[in-house]
Image: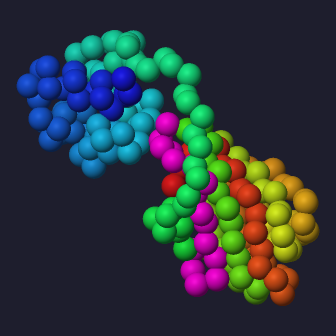
């Protein structure tokens, strides 16, 4: 059982609607819905508020959650829904499924010659790792710029504002891994 399923089970056992749980806990209705539909896991703060609203200890909320080792995630084919465009010259392709059950987010970054991504700043404490497969890449992190060529890597604090630029004349392809998972 996953956290969202457990919340729904406990909420329904108390004959409480999702709206009532939202109003009483202070957790956004959309967040609760995403949690119950296994689109997100929520934060520790939201879990505490939910447990208090349901009149249970936090340990009771976590009881009976799935403790099985995750199965390998083999992904043979990609779909168009797995690709997210920053703009007309750059895109991310998600390289795994069941994102909210993962601790890292692997993506394939593609940037056309002269293109760049939008500025990003992930949550505090998040990290990114980049491995250049082909092309050249400039990574702007805070006030620093790092130039990478094929085979080069960079590991950095993704909580800092950053963006990627392809200064070359060929397509840039790089594997990027973000932890924790956030979209």
x, y (%) of residue 6? Answer: 30, 24
Q: Is residue 67 above or below residue 95?
A: above
Report if residue 98 lies within the magenta region.
Answer: yes
The quadrant the N terminus occupies is: top left
Q: Is residue 89 left or right of residue 149?
A: left
Report if residue 93 lies within the magenta region.
Answer: yes
Viewer-nearest residue: 59 or 89:
89
x 15%, y 41%: residue = 19
Q: Quadrant of residue 138?
A: bottom right
x 18%, y 26%: residue = 11
Res. 93 in view: yes
Q: Is residue 57 above or below residue 6?
A: above
Q: Quadrant of residue 58?
A: top left
How many numbered callouts?
Answer: 0
x, y (%) of residue 120? Answer: 62, 64
x, y (%) of residue 102? Answer: 55, 38
Q: Quadrant of residue 87?
A: bottom right
Q: Is residue 169 above or below residue 86?
A: below
x, y (%) of residue 53? Answer: 23, 24
């Amino acid at each position: 059982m996953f956290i969202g399923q457990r919340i729904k089970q406990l909420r329904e056992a108390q004959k409480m609607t999702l709206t009532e749980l939202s109003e009483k806990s202070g957790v956004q209705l959309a967040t609760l819905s995403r949690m119950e539909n296994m689109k997100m896991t929520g934060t520790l703060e939201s879990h505490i508020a939910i447990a208090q609203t349901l009149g249970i200890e936090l340990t009771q909320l976590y009881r009976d959650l799935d403790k099985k080792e995750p199965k390998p995630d083999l992904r043979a084919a990609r779909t168009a829904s797995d690709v997210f465009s920053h703009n007309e010259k750059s895109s991310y392709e998600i390289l795994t499924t069941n994102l909210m059950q993962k601790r890292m987010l692997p993506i394939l970054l593609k940037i056309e010659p002269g293109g760049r991504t939008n500025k990003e700043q992930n949550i505090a404490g998040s990290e990114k790792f980049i491995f250049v497969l082909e092309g050249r890449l400039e990574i702007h992190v805070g006030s620093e710029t790092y130039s990478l060529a094929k085979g080069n890597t960079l590991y950095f604090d993704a909580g800092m504002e950053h963006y990627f630029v392809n200064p070359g004349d060929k397509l840039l392809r790089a594997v990027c891994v973000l932890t924790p998972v956030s979209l």
